[in-house]
Amino acid sequence: MMKKIVITALLGLSLTLTGCGSSDSEGESQLETQQMLDNGEYAAVIAKLESTASSTSDYLSLAAAYMGKAGFSLSSIVGLVATSAESGDDSTFASFIESTQSASNSQSLKDLDTAVVYYQKVLENKCLDENATLSGAESDLCLYVGLSQVSQTAVAISYITGDVNVLNDNNGSDDKLTASLCAMQYAFDGTQDTNCSFSSESNVTFIQSGKTYGDVNITVNGNQYEYLITGSVIPRSTVITNGLCSLTDFSTRVDDINDTSYHVCPIDETNSTIETTTEEILVQALNEGTDTIGAAVSDDVSADVEQFKLDILAANGRENDTNTTITIEDIIKYLDDNNK
């Protein structure tokens, strides 16, 4: 069944890309694009199409290219979902998180989000519209969108841990994850968990973007970690960060520097983008992703991803709730339970 799902999905995408009734030149261009995707030339596809994209095939090609650039193909994500569900581990979602780590890279979170944006240009949010009637091709695309969103969540969790393997091996805890969970709880309700030592919160402003964040340092077992927090009114959220940068130049990032003018840097900090928060990725993307996959009516994959959600809900004793919307509290409890 697994092989059938992958082949059907890829065939559906291929047929959609090829299209019907296109001119010879358009058909040749689409074939060239498909060959570039097949060869893993993702940057070339993006360079070719992004500035002029206007058709369904352009948007789908760009979505596929950004997924590939993120380190994931449609078949690989489906394979990771199925392997995690069949692993026999206590937490199938923890297995999925662990398995995505080797596939992802520093740009994966942003690239997966961009892939979703291009898929949505074709779907126009039909996947979450209960009254929408989806064609077979649209159902396939809903599956791709949902898988991209669930993968975003898994990749985001890898950013807030030092050793993602602890989530799935019952061999101790990870200090960085402990600190991250303390920061997330503090941002959400102001609570300072006794497992962590907190510095006084101050403000930092990134000059190029003009954005100001709450800044707090959290120490666990002698190891200190810095977190940026959005907003000034509870509930707030921590920011997904990657590397360090100075307040005057976030285009140049470093991994380690002993200089107080450097701070953890928002993963997608630019002059124009909105920062990515843990709540946005861990709550919104996961809920929308699982709901979107459900709309795709792909029974095997839908059931496997639904188990991810049940894993998280069960951590807070909510596995039998009629309301299956995951909250930030559910995520914190789930990660904390697995970080032991």
Image (spheres, helix red, strand yellow):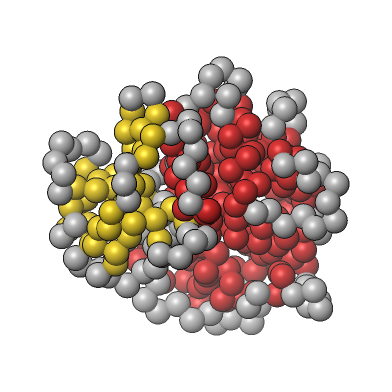
Q: Give the residue displayed 32% in from the left and 33% down from the top.
A: 224
Q: Going by the picture, which residue comes out furthest to the top?
A: 171
Residue under the image location 80 percent in, 58 percent down: 323
Q: Is residue 237 left or right of residue 144?
A: left
Which image quarter is the C terminus in? Answer: top right
Identify whether 301 is placed above or below 91.
Answer: below
In this view, 182 is above or below 293: above
Q: Residue at x 71, y 26 (%)?
A: 89
Nearer-the-camera pick, 150 or 37: 150
State the image quarter where residue 124 is shown.
bottom right
Residue 254 percent location from the top left of the image: 22, 43
Q: Looking at the image, which is closer to me, 231 or 263?
A: 231
In the rendered image, which quarter contains the N terminus? Answer: top right
x and y percent of residue 328 in the render?
60, 52
Location of residue 219 by image quarter: top left
Q: Is residue 212 left or right of residue 147?
A: left
Question: How many numbered marks are there?
Answer: 0
Residue 211 shows in the view: yes
Taking the spot 24% from the left edge, 48% from the top edge, the residue there is: 263
Residue 335 at x, y = what percent? Answer: 59, 37
Q: Is residue 188 left or right of residue 242?
A: right
